Image (cartoon, grey):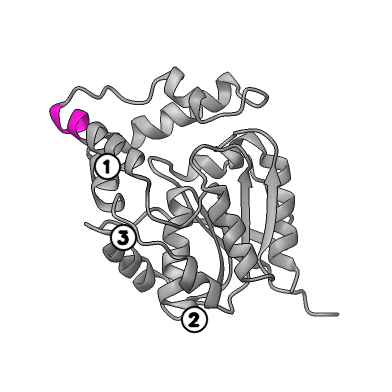
Amino acid sequence: MAEQEQPVDIYLLPGTMCNKALWQHLVTPSSVRLHHLPISAGESIDDIVDNLRQRLSGMNIPLVGFSLGGYLAASLTSRYPELVSKLMIISNSPCALSHAEISHRKLLLSALQSGKYQGMTERKAAAFLDPETCSQSIIEIMMDMDAQLGREEFIRQISATTERDDLLDVLSQLTVPISLVYSKHDPLVDVPWCESLVASRQSVQQKVFDGKGHMLPLEKANLISNFITQWATTD
């Protein structure tokens, strides 16, 4: 009897205030197994990445990161490329945040620390979604994730992850295969940055969706599932 091939294990890093519920609608064949990686504790990007490195020590894995998780996955790959066999970045451009985003985060952090922030609202959740894919069920998942993680975790994530380096140069020089997946009108993705990475390294693959949807693992679950499966099982 022929020996059955081992399934491909893919590790998934979520975004800000997201947990394993982010991936709940992804469906892959038995040849692919998905593993949720919570965002590690830490006071900075470097701390979080070092904690992830310790958890993944000795491994060589396909790594998928969504939003903040995309930046963390790119940073981990940049510093410890021996841990990652291939990298997929969803709804993120691993660069420094804009001045406007940094200002917004300072205001948000102030509201969080003062207790004025009351959690994710339906209106805020809907702002991350494309009108064509916005649904009450997705909004409720987003609000539930936010509530489960809580205010203190939100403070920690915002405080630790606002200061970011631009990873364009280092990612351009890596030999690890890279795939970018994003919506072309997502206001949280710097599309020219993504195009610069592709221009500097022709082997970078892109999957670009129409619209502005940010929460692609929830909004485009079937397409993302198929893309991850093909990506993971193709050399």
Where residue 100 sits in the image (x, y, percent)? Answer: 34, 38
Q: Is residue 126 above or below residue 76?
A: above
Instruction: Tell me the magenta residue range.
Output: 110-114
Q: Residue furthest left?
A: 114
Q: Secondary structure at mark 1?
A: helix
Residue that mark 3 sits on:
45
Residue that mark 1 sits on:
153
Q: Secondary structure at mark 3?
A: helix
Q: Nearer the viewer, residue 117 or 5?
A: 117
- Describe residue 155's horizontal placement relative to residue 59 as left or right: left
Q: Is residue 127 above or below residue 208?
A: above
Q: Nearer the viewer, residue 104 or 6?
A: 104
For residue 150, which quarter of the picture?
A: top left
Q: Is residue 32 above or below residue 192?
A: below
> What residue lies at 68% left-to-right and 65% top-to-bottom?
232
Where residue 39 sits in the image (x, y, percent)? Answer: 37, 54
